[in-house]
């Protein structure tokens, strides 16, 4: 097998990159370790920045999002008995976010890829990357017991945090930065009407809580939990009671509860690998970086990486000049670190870090300062809707 760009991983990063490259006439093959059903079974975030929305349009995978997604013009911060709305639209000169689940984005991109008749090999086992410091990179894998080789010009490692691509980078050429947080998020999906039309992020003395949604009949809620907790420790009843305890009373009073249809615990982590280019291999999305979910930046950062990589690859094939690729890592990392900062800050601001009363007072002072100052609100809004994409030369 031979292609121009071998893409490892059919998550949102790999599928979006594949679709854009296809539109630009750049042949690509995706190798995915799992089945499509498994990939679609992962419940993840659901807030899309305008940049990502625009890219889904460009990829020709936006029709259902335009129909079923919900534009949100603001969200609420709840703390110390107060509720402060961040008016995204007003504070950013008209920018908003789109609430549309990552699962749906993935499904739409899978459908678009099917329609484009582009090759995706699912259940590709033992994927290995070779010779990416030469001009003849290769990816080997096993499919249905048969050993296969994919020759290519470039490899895009879109295989998530646990993938093989980052691990294939030479140890002396990669540097990783990490912060692990001392708590997790317990998430519940339920067929109930969302408690409020916009998202509510709550700082509470019992711990953080978040009210989100997928659509008018599907709610997504989270509470901060201990890393030692198991999903089995959390009956639906315990979850609903804890969520109510952390929300403003009038919100808790109208919370519609029901059986959970998904319940999971996720640890929180900040992680960045530098650089993101190793010869002819590029890291994209979760393969290179992780943010805690507090700022809803994970999926959106993957999209901005894809924007940068697809643009430099397009320029490379149009001009024949390989040097344009060298800017990928620096441009991607510049935006990544700013989103890492925002996600870390939102996490620090809203969660319970032990019982230290000094830390709690500082959090409340921070929230009071930022929400009472127009500059503060604007800073939150501008980061939440997504910072501009870095310009590619
Ligand atoms: N070979 C082939 N595929 C692999 C391998 C491997 N060795 N290891 C992992 N994969 C696949 C996974 O099965 C998964 O489908 O790579 C894909 C990576 O997808 P994601 O983890 O979703 O990562 P990414 O596409 O970068 O998505 C960005 O945004 O909201 C956040 O973390 C969230 O998934 C989200 C991310
Ligand atoms: C979600 O809907 O799953 C969600 C929304 C906002 C976040 C994190 C997760 O910050």
Image (cartoon, rainbow, N blue to C red):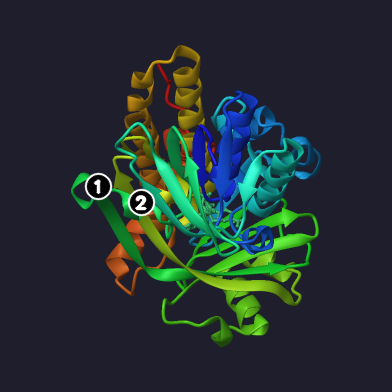
Q: Is residue 37 above or below residue 73?
A: below
For the residues labelled 2 and 1, the Cα–Cα distance comes to 9 Å
Q: Quadrant of the N terminus?
A: top right
Q: Name the one closer to the observer, 170 or 261.
A: 170
Mark 2 residue's CB less than 8 Å from ligand 1: no
What residue is rendered at 63% in x and 65% in y? 221
* Coordinates of residue 167 in the picture (x, y in percent): 33, 55
The answer, for residue 366, to whether it is visible in the render is no
Q: Quadrant of residue 78?
A: bottom right
Q: Secondary structure at mark 2?
A: helix
Q: Nearer the viewer, residue 371 or 155?
A: 155
> Residue 197 vs residue 179: left or right?
right
Mark 2 or mark 1, earlier in chain? 2
Quarter of image, res 15:
top right
Using residue 372 as the reference point, say whether residue 262 is left or right of it.
Answer: right
Is residue 371 or residue 235 the one in the foreground?
Answer: 235
Q: Residue at x 49, y 55 (%)?
A: 141
Dots 2, 1 in contact, CB < 8 A: yes
Instruction: Please name whichever residue, 226 or 281, is drawn nearer the observer in this view of the structure.
Output: 281
- Pointer 1 residue: 174
Q: Residues within 10 Å of mark 1 (few under 14, many from 20)?
A: some
Establish if 360 lies above or below 178.
below
Residue that mark 2 sits on: 166
Q: Is residue 317 left or right of residue 45?
A: left
What residue lies at 78% left-to-right and 36% top-to-bottom?
63
């Amino acid at each position: 097998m031979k292609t121009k760009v071998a893409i490892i991983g059919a998550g949102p990063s790999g599928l979006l990159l594949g679709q854009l490259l296809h539109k630009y006439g750049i042949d690509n093959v995706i190798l995915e370790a799992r089945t499509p059903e498994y990939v679609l079974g992962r419940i993840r975030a659901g807030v899309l920045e305008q940049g990502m929305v625009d890219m889904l349009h460009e990829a020709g995978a936006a029709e259902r999002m335009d129909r079923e997604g919900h534009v949100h013009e603001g969200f609420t911060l709840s703390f110390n008995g107060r509720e402060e709305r961040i008016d995204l639209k007003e504070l950013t000169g008209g920018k908003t976010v789109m609430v549309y689940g990552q699962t749906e984005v993935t499904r739409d991109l899978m459908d678009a890829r099917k329609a484009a008749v582009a090759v995706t090999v699912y259940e590709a086992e033992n994927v290995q990357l070779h010779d990416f410091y030469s001009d003849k990179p290769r990816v080997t894998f096993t499919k249905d017991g048969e050993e296969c080789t994919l020759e290519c010009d470039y490899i895009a490692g879109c295989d998530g945090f646990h993938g093989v691509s980052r691990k294939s980078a030479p140890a002396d050429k990669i540097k990783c930065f990490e912060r692990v947080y001392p708590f997790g998020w317990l998430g519940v999906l339920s067929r109930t009407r969302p408690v409020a039309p916009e998202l509510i992020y709550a700082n509470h003395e019992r711990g953080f809580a978040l009210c989100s949604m997928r659509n008018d009949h599907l709610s997504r809620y989270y509470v901060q939990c201990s890393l030692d907790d198991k999903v089995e420790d959390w009956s639906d009843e315990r979850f609903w009671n804890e969520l109510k305890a952390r929300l403003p009373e009038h919100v808790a009073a109208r919370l519609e509860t029901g059986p959970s249809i998904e319940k999971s615990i996720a640890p929180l982590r900040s992680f960045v690998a530098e650089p993101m280019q190793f010869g002819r291999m590029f890291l994209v999305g979760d393969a290179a970086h992780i943010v805690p979910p507090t700022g809803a930046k994970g999926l959106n950062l993957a999209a901005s990486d894809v924007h940068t990589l697809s643009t430099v690859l397009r320029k490379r094939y149009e001009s024949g000049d390989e040097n344009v690729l060298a800017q990928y890592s620096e441009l991607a990392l510049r935006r990544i670190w700013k989103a890492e900062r925002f996600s870390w800050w939102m996490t620090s601001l809203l969660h319970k870090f032990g019982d230290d009363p000094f830390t709690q007072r500082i959090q409340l002072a921070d929230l009071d300062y930022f929400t009472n100052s127009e500059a503060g609100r604007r800073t939150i809004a501008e980061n939440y809707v997504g910072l501009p994409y870095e310009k590619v030369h």
